[in-house]
Image (cartoon, rainbow, N blue to C red):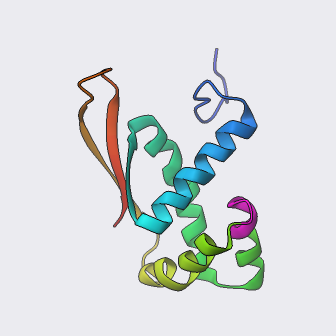
Amino acid sequence: MRHHAKGRAFGRPTNQRRALLRSLARSLILHERISTTEAKAKELRPFVERLVTYGKRDTLASRRLARARMGGDDETVTKLFSAIAPRYADRAGGYTRIVKRSKSASDGRKTAYIAFV
């Protein structure tokens, strides 16, 4: 039974799963739209939306929190705080959109785009 078990494991240990989310978040922030599996996109959404909320506050503490969540990646945090977060200053959440695509022809996995609104 999965009582109170949140999130998807993706068949990876915790450190690899955290690295996967950081890598996907970095790609999304830098390119503003990425294609990945549907499950990874659904797992990435709350991670990135929390980062954008930190960016909207734009305090030293929120910059440090965002930098810690991104594993010390300065380039991504700078773009998040200077370009992406100001776009959503008057929006109360829902900064990303997931668009489902057709199944992959080779292995049948469900793919999706995740992009900023």
Tally the numbered discs: 0
Q: Camera-side residue: 115 or 61?
A: 115
Looking at the image, residue 87 sits to the left or right of residue 117; the answer is right
Q: Which residue is drawn at 68% across and 44% down?
A: 18
Percent coordinates x, y for residue 113 in the rendering: 33, 49
The quadrant in which the N terminus is found is: top right
Asked if residue 35 is among those painted magenta in the image, a careful observer would answer no
- Image quadrant of residue 79? bottom right
Asked if residue 70 is among those painted magenta in the image, a careful observer would answer yes
109 above or below 81? above
Q: Which residue is drawn at 71% across and 85% down?
A: 59
Q: Residue at x 48, y 67 (%)?
A: 30
The part of the chain drawn in magenta is: 66-72
Q: Which residue is drawn at 73% across and 35% down?
A: 14
Percent coordinates x, y for residue 74 in the rendering: 68, 73
The quadrant in which the C terminus is found is: bottom left
Q: Camera-side residue: 78 or 40?
A: 78
* Residue 28 visible in the snapshot: yes
93 above or below 10? below
Percent coordinates x, y for residue 43 in the rendering: 52, 43
Percent coordinates x, y for residue 24 in the rendering: 53, 51
85 above or below 10? below
* Residue 54 visible in the snapshot: no
Looking at the image, residue 68 sits to the left or right of residue 2; the answer is right
